[in-house]
Image (spheres, rainbow, N blue to C red):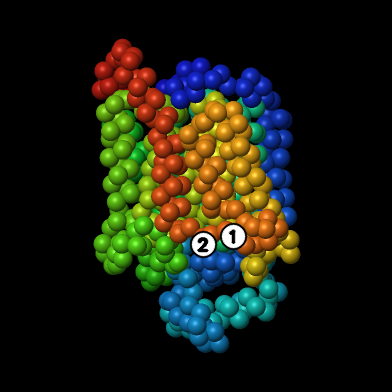
Amino acid sequence: MSLPAPPPDAVPHGARKPISWLDRTLSARWCALGWMMSVTTFLGLMRLLGGPATGDSPETIYATWAIAHGKFACAYPPPTTLHFYPLFRPQPPAPPLWPLLSGGFAALLRIGHRIPFPSGGALGPHCATAFDAIYRWAGETRATLPTVGLGYLSWLVLMAGVIALLRSSGRGRCGWEPATLVLLACLPPLWMPLLNLFHPQDLMAVGLALGGLACARRGWWAWAGGLLGLAFTSQQFAVLVAAPLLVMAPWNRRLRFAGSAIAAAALVTVPMIAVTSGRALRATVLGSGNTLSFGGTVLWELHLHGTPLVAVSRLLPIALSVALAWWAVRRLGATVREPVPLVSVIAISLSLRLVFEQNLFGYYFMALVVSLVVLDVIGGQIRGPLVAWLVLVFLAFILVPIGLAPNAEPWGLQADGALRLAAVAAAVLFIVLSVARARFRPSLLAWSVLVVVAFSRWPPWMDLPLRHQLPLWFWQVVLVATGAALAAGPLVSSVRVHGRVKPSLTDVDEDVALSV
């Protein structure tokens, strides 16, 4: 069995008592109403801002259509150029779990069935002309928008993972549960995987990973491994959850956890690799994110290429996350599996991905944002620095589709400018009040100055920045460093509290007792 969730007053990183009305127990009916409110909020905001984007959709929609029509062998056709668009090359494909799920729903909803799908002859030997044929078919059937609409399903998976983790940590079935879901539905980094580009597999991977953490909290290590194995087949950054969790698992549960993770991943990937003659292997192992796009990050500035680049961007974060988990186990023992230190370790691990990325887009922060919000909810309060950090993440990237984006609304540019103007006005007001009262909070003052310097425009109603845009590597350093600090704070507090409390059992004896 697992450790019981600590009472709210015992959570080490929250000094203030949680808001009482959020701790009140809710009936199943009110919980379900909160879920519906979260879904309505997410769908409403997405539709208001233009709906799912089609950018990066070629990573998954070709596989979705092939699977929906039973052409599994052509779900991962060889890369080629379209004959009538010679400059267009399909993007690297995503792992197979999302195409399998969306393909099943596309078949069930008969998306694109108005016109027959290309025959085996049209797809060519070894699917050599599959991209051409499927592209023409999609244009005739207009199947793209209904297919990207299936991306909304990924929000349901994320919701399920959040609910499961909150309930296993003592924050479920009370006001915190619907409040957390609605809060997440209102955060732009959770829209970005669908709104700015099309990456529903990222949302689904985070939801499955959180479900795995919930199972680990309850001592269901086989289920935890299975869910994290599935998360890996949705997006590879799930390894940054699975690897440290393996280190933090009781020693006599690690084999069960690892075995079920490998089995679940193999169940999804091995058949796809076999039926596609090995073409799905790269998507399974590396996914679509290991491709240089716009660059601009610290790693990009180092001009690494080939094997060293893959080693640094993909393997080094995993190694550091394992080292972090080992250190946490050494300092906390079995207490590391309590909700706050457990989620704190995972949040730090997810931030390591952003440290060593070749590219940096707003939706990359989605996993870290979810883990930080859940971490604060488990601790019983939303920290002010987290709110300031979230606002800075919003401002550093495009908030809503604008310009030539296919899903851009006519008022998108004005809305984006108004949001930035409001943030700058709030920052200026805080600076003026701080000077007038001679009371300075260094962190918030630094935040206010950065917002004013980076996002001020003059005149305010024109899209004319006062200075050149800050480089991407600058935002990477600022946002990732502060996000990692927010994730590490509760872990450091837990280590300090644990160091002042003499344990009644040794770590080894406690691990054995917990696993009985």
Q: Secondary structure at mark 2?
A: loop
Mark 2 to mark 1: distance in Å? 7 Å
Circle 1 crowding by C-alpha within 10 Å: few under 14, some 14–19, many from 20: some
Question: In this orientation, which residue lies closer to the viewer: 332 or 132?
Answer: 332
The reply to whether residue 512 is in sight is: no
Residue at image x 37%, y 28%?
492
Residue at image x 33%, y 33%?
248
The reply to whether residue 218 is in sight is: yes
- Residue type indicated by callout 1: Pro
Residue at image x 36%, y 38%?
245
Percent x, y of residue 253: 32, 33
The residue labelled by disc 1 is 465
Which numbered tag is attached to residue 468? 2
Question: In this orientation, which residue lies closer to the viewer: 378 or 274?
Answer: 378
Q: Secondary structure at mark 1?
A: loop
Q: Quadrant of the N terminus?
A: top left
Question: In this orientation, which residue lies closer to the viewer: 191 or 63?
Answer: 191
277 left or right, relative to 452: left
Q: Quadrant of the C terminus?
A: top left
Please say if 484 is above or below 293. above
Question: In this orientation, which residue lies closer to the viewer: 274 or 89?
Answer: 89
Outermost residue to the bottom? 84
Please say if 202 is above or below 73. above
Whether tag 2 and tag 1 are in contact, CB under 8 A, the answer is: yes
18 left or right, relative to 375: right
Please say if 215 is above or below 52. above
Residue at image x 52%, y 37%?
445
